[in-house]
Image (cartoon, grey):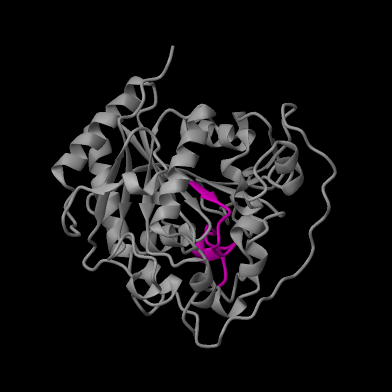
Amino acid sequence: MALTKFTNTYLITNRAYPQEQWARYIYPCTQGALWFYTAPGQYNSNTAAYTPANPTATNIVPPAFAAALTRDLQVAIANGCPQITVYVHGLANYFSDTCNELGTYGTNLQAQGYNGLVIGFDWPSYGEVESYEYYGSLPYSFPPSKLSGTIRDNINGSVKSFRTLLTILSNICKQNNAKLNFMCHSEGNYMLMLAMNRIDFSPTPLLNQILLMAADINTGALQTPSYSPPWSGQSWSLQQFATGVTVYWSSHDDALPYSEGWTNYHNPSFPNRLGLHGPASFGLNPDKSDQLIRNAYGLDCSLVVNRTVMNNNRVPPSVTVHSGYFYIPQVLQDMSKTFNGVPPANIPYRVSANQPDGRAYVMKVASALSTGPIEPKNESLEPEIPEGA
């Protein structure tokens, strides 16, 4: 039976000037405010089609936006998937890039079995050049000390808006007996980590599945703080607020090695990137308690998310391995099953990595995918950043 299509595409942003591309005007709204945009049709990628539901930034959801979103959530429920999934982009994204990615990724996920409603959250990232020039403020601190300026300062200034978004969507899902997921890519994982750190929601928002894709955050972010060095466990609260957290990582990522070279801007105890290496530890402590938070899982996608598999399966060459997760059918099917609550050990093509806590998996290549020899990737890339960035 054919699925009923969604009427609109939904994008929420906290950019003070949403469609500006001049860095001077790219910074967060104040006081947790948001812009609420819709575009006609299902997973619309056309930036020009998006119109705001509110004349000025607000921290109260516009009634027309809430009503439209609720109607399409009812479509998702009728299609057998009572869920809203929020896509949170990485750096080097303008508003227009997020529109394009939302349309593409929503379409690709649905084609591989996910029938929930995918919407987007667009935090104020710069373009590609400025994102690398103004990545973070020095010296390193968590959270950052500023609320705008560099990429990580802008993310810090977006925390209130992200929490506004979380409260609004949690309430809509609760009213409709639906579930709320987050799908974060690259620096979008830092957005989630900052927003969920030291969280004090009342009432507590209950989240379903959190997918950390190619995460540009430290490998110790999901460790239990009491058993790890300083600066670890910044995302430990996800153990309290989410049903499950899955780290999708690949040793063949072609963007994170650059980020890993920026050691002055990263956690001194865990400088490696989660999306390149996976969680720091899957072990059990001598008292049999976990080192990794108890609802977190690591999925090593290196055998599938790499240039060889992408080329052999006609993924456009302009798509980086860093973003390849959203184009490879097998990975999209895995994501869909994860959102739908299939136990990690029961998802096809996952095999145990035989770690002490039993929560580390390796994604094997499905027979339907074309693969070939994969060259080992051991290079170390250390680009320079201006001292004042």
Q: Which SS type dominates the magenta stretch?
A: loop
Residue 168 location in percent, x, y?
24, 47
Residue at image location 54% in from the left, 72% down from the top: 132
Q: Judge whether residue 212 is colored magenta.
A: yes
Q: In this view, does 35 lie to the left or right of 157?
A: left
Residue projecting furthest to the top: 1
* Residue 282 visible here: no
Residue at image location 41% in from the left, 54% down from the top: 96
Residue 312 location in percent, x, y?
75, 38
Residue projecting furthest to the bottom: 387
Magenta stretch, residue numbers? 211-229
Residue projecting furthest to the front: 48
Q: In this view, does 300 lie to the left or right of 158?
A: right
Front residue of 100/159: it is 100
* Residue 61 visible here: yes
In the rendered image, the quadrant that contains the N terminus is top left
Front residue of 170/237: it is 170
Q: Is residue 179 above or below residue 383?
A: above
Residue at image location 39% in from the left, 77% down from the top: 149
Q: In this view, does 147 lie to the left or right of 267?
A: left
Q: Please identify the quarter of the rendering in which residue 155 is found.
A: bottom left
Q: In this view, does 43 lie above or below 360?
A: above
Q: Judge whether residue 153 is colored magenta.
A: no
Residue 266 location in percent, x, y?
55, 74
Q: Please identify the quarter of the rendering in which residue 362 is found.
A: top right
Residue 212 location in percent, x, y?
52, 50
